[in-house]
Image: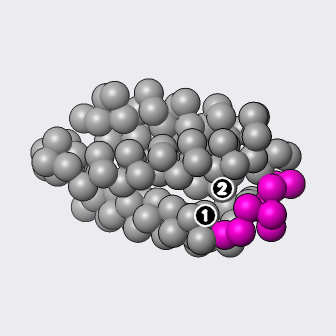
């Protein structure tokens, strides 16, 4: 996949996930969860937003090689996150999938996970 296509797809997945995690369905899914899990969800949302901003403002030429190098893991992580979003009520699955994607993107742009 061309680096610009991969980056565009990645930004799209990040946007979809941020929107899902700001939905009423997600809020309902968090009801009754332990405080630690709700805190983890909030921190994950912030990390996703920050990653989206960093990736969106990074110059493609500067991250092209890292996108290519990490493409298989990025594609796998994006697919897992997409599947997790389909079952938004399963908070743990969404958080695990988001964390996996954030770890991979962290190798490409400077983010705090």
Q: In the drawing, does residue 36 fall left or right of residue 101?
A: left
Look at the numbered disc 2 and give the secondary structure of its residue: helix
Which mark is nearer the camera, 2 or 1?
Answer: 1
In magenta, the rendered stretch is 58-66
Q: Which residue is mark 2?
A: 105
Screen quadrant of the C terminus? bottom right
Structural crowding at the residue carrying mark 2, measured as other residues with C-alpha within 10 Å and reported as few (<14), some (14–19) or many (≥20): many
Q: Tell me, for residue 23, which label it has, or none.
A: none
Q: What secondary structure is found at the residue carrying circle 1?
A: helix
Name the residue that disc number 1 marks: 55
How far apart are the two marked residues, 2 and 1, measured between alpha carbons?
8 Å
Contact check, label 2 and label 1, Cβ < 8 Å: yes
What residue do we see at 71% from left, 68% from top? 59
The secondary structure that dominates the magenta segment is helix
User: Is residue 62 rendered to the left or right of residue 37?
Assistant: right
- Which residue is at 45% across, 33% downward? 82
Residue 27's place in the image compared with 39, above or below, is above
Magenta stretch encompasses residue 92: no
Question: Where residue 96 sits: x, y (%)?
Answer: 49, 43
Percent position (x, y) of residue 73?
Answer: 72, 38
Question: Image quadrant of residue 28?
Answer: top left
What residue lies at 60% left-to-right and 38% top-to-bottom?
Answer: 77
The residue closer to the viewer here, 100 or 85, is 85
Q: Is residue 2 above or below residue 66?
A: above
Residue 82 seen in render: yes
């Amino acid at each position: 996949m061309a680096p610009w296509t991969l980056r565009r797809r990645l930004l799209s997945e990040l946007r979809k996930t941020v929107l899902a995690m700001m939905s009423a369905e997600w809020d309902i899914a968090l009801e009754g969860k332990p405080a630690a899990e709700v805190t983890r969800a909030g921190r994950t949302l912030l990390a996703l937003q920050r990653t989206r901003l960093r990736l969106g403002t990074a110059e493609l030429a500067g991250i092209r090689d890292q996108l290519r190098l990490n493409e298989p893991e990025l594609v796998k992580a994006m697919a897992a996150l997409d599947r997790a979003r389909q079952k938004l009520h399963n908070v743990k699955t969404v958080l695990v999938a988001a964390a996996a994607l954030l770890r991979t993107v962290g190798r490409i742009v400077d983010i705090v996970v």
